Image (spheres, rainbow, N blue to C red):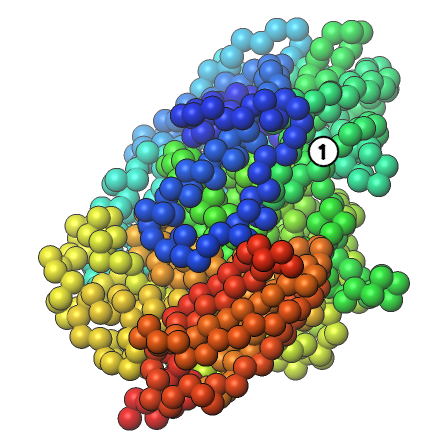
Amino acid sequence: MLDCTRKNVVFRQVLMFVFVVSAGWNSCLLARGESPTNREEDLTVRSPGVFDSYETMRSELAKLRDVYKPFMRSLPTALNVRKQTPIDKRWRFAYEVEPFELSRKEYVKGRDIPPPKKWYTKDYDDSSWEKVAVPEWRYQRQKVAGWHGKAPTSVRWYRTSFSTPVVKNNKRLFLVFKGVDWRAQVWLNGKYVGSHITYHEPFRFDVTELLEKDNVLAVRVIDGPGYGEPVAYWSPFPGPMSKNPRYTRDNQKEFLLSLTGPDGAAGPQGIAGHGGGGGGLIREVYLESCGENCIAAVFARANLQNNTVKVKVETDAKIDRKASIEVRIIPENFVGQPFLKTIGKKLPKGSAEHEITVPLSEMKLWSPRSPYLYRCRVILKDGGKVVDGQDVLFGCRSFTVTSTEESKKTGDIPGTLHLNGKTIFLRGANTNGLNLWWYWGQDDKIVDCLLMLKLANFNMVRVTQHVNFPEVREYMDRLGIMSEQDQGYGNGRIGITSPEEWLATARPLARECYNNPGVVIVNYCNEATLNALNVKKLMDEVLAVDPERVIMPISGLRKTVLPTGYSNNLVRDYHSYEGWYGRRPGEMWNLTRKVRNRGHEGTPMVNSKFVMGEYGAEAMDSYETMKSIFPPQFEVPDSPDVDVLKGYFQVKKDGLKQKVGFYGKAPRNLGEYIEASQNYQAMLLAERTTTFRISPDKLSGYIMFYFAEPLPSFWPKAIVSSNLCPKKAYYEMAKVNRPLVPLFQIQKGGKSMEMWIANDFARKFKNCKISWMMKSGGKELLMGSKIVDVPASNAILAEKVNLATVPEETKMVNISLRLTDSAGKELSSYERELWLELWRKELAIFK
């Protein structure tokens, strides 16, 4: 972790630009230290259909921006202690080892990394190399018809020259890399400086003694599973089929015009699969000056029990010397009292760690509703003179898991999650592409996307198999979005990794996310079978950095038996695509049932809550979206009446799922294919999410797959297109996700209907009335109500309604539910159209 102070000067300007003041933004509210509107509770009382169109969604989004404007502020004056000098963007690039794929026989062991060529010498002639701008990330996508490619492996070089800046007062100069994907080997003026792995962790080298007046910097970048990188399906950036598979900070238009279909040409299918890999100098490179004795890293963690903040300061001293360490805890986005503590220390030569505990009275907690942040400012002084300083942002919050032992005392089910001591149920969505939007300077799009998540009542995201840049994580912290950050590592279909290299990623991710209050879970693997001993080693490595960290070793558990003794830090996660892949595709009537305890593929059943980490279905973009954002080479027809599929991966014209989505008929043109796919996605997500909402005794949350596409037609399981235009499922999820919501489930055969109330709030609602009504063609078929006490953080079956009075010939019905308190005030509501005939006739309806 590096000093974020200087980048915050620019980043804070971006934050203010994104949240430009168009009307007063309630600064007096923050000055008094009060909380803005309780948005989560406010959303529970909205009338049905308020988010049923793009226009109403945008209107509500504007209101939500106003609510969170105060939290985007950065009130402290920027710290200006270190000086940064960017390394020239003009670099030279060449492959030492061209991208290659492993054969099946090589999957187990991979290959040895070859010794470097002497391309690092200062006088090496690189004039024939490609000229490139840095940062960049380039990747290799194979021309495959399927959606699983094989991650390639390569060795690439970057070279540049620069002059040494003038420094005074015995300043040290560090060569800083904000991110290199994957393994970096660095030479300066022909001398080896060091190496580093993981793309998401910045790193630096002291090059004070190696610098000359004019310098040559050479960086060898090794990436891919063949040389040990733990690759995943998804990379730090999307990896679509493209004629120019390379990202830079300013190549958005050029990149979109280079996109192709899976066959290497502009085809009807989507532009991407996954399983691609890439690498490069993906973040900035610069020189940074600081004193002889300096701060290497700062970690801050609040203790909610005794109102203190424990600050760990890592120092890097060139000489043994006495110094004072001054720690200030300053309110970041609200007006409040700063807190100061200063200690005297003798800094030993080399690396050392110092702990300072700072009392913090009137602590303001970070939560999704009120994301209060603090700035921890550490100043290093020598004889009263400032020699170095560093800022980090953090929030005061706790996130814990009920362990097996604790459950015996508290009565909570093992695996129950708690935020700030209160039970929290995760209503999440997988997401991909926020790094890319930040890369292309689309900060306003990131903010809109995150606020659309909140508007649809999601409270967290899983950053699918990659890690967000720190700037993106800060947006999540400021907007009150919890996240799961994924190191990423997949199974044999996309590559291999050595256990040693994978285990080496444990500490960097734990360190990198330590201060982010929004990062509540870290994950290290996806849908793979791992050695239980290696999982234990991973847990130990992470907890050595952060003993409080909640860890998901594997998202999508398979045959791995997780180690015992870690139940207060461990989250289990499974993936289920029933209704889309494999089991019961199209059979909506078979998806209605409660969740049971889970083991998986031979592992024992476990009486502990788990997270449903992936589920979903595909839906095509709307025709209007295709026409407005698809690049010209995609050749969208002039009319949706043409019989052609565009922008899809797994949709089949005559498939059962399309017929279900078109209510028994076969769609016959692009417009109908789109409508059928969006209807089916909305149906499936409504049914499956309802099942998860009414199963809090088995689940601690769900994370649907996935939220917004990063590029046009990248991976159409998203419920929001890349232009942030919602598909039908977005509006369905907004209703099912309400923290307090009445829900229904049609039972097998369509003979009865269960009425449920799901309550994610940590408080009871007594003497509530749930009312229901079923209509068809405007005609009332049945109605009823019941008084019920709604338990806290739970779901309750309110009533089972017999549907015998509903005529057998009934096809479509509208079911509306209303929940009111004892005074008759509406607390929540739910409404959905349902194809009742499908539950009653099942497959016979298509014959």
Q: Nearer the viewer, residue 167 or 717?
A: 717
Residue 89 lies left or right of residue 607; in this view the side is left
Q: Residue at x 32, y 46 (%)?
A: 55
Task: Give the quadrant of the C terminus.
Answer: bottom left
Q: Residue at x 43, y 75 (%)?
A: 774
Instruction: Give the percent coordinates (x, y) of residue 652.
Output: 28, 75
Name the residue type under label 1.
Answer: Lys
Task: Give the quadrant of the N terminus.
Answer: top right
Q: Please say if 827 is above or below 441.
A: below
Say if residue 413 shows up in the picture: yes
Residue 644 lies left or right of residue 674; in this view the side is left
Q: Please say if 803 is above or below 629.
A: below
Residue 494 lies left or right of residue 754; in this view the side is left
**How many numbered discs?**
1
At numbered mark 1, what does the secondary structure look like: helix, strand or loop? loop
Q: Residue at x 19, y 52 (%)?
A: 627
Q: Nearer the viewer, residue 737 or 228?
A: 737
Q: Nearer the viewer, residue 432 or 673?
A: 673
Residue 628 lies left or right of residue 72; in this view the side is left
Q: Residue at x 33, y 82 (%)?
A: 811
Q: Which residue is mark 1?
A: 364
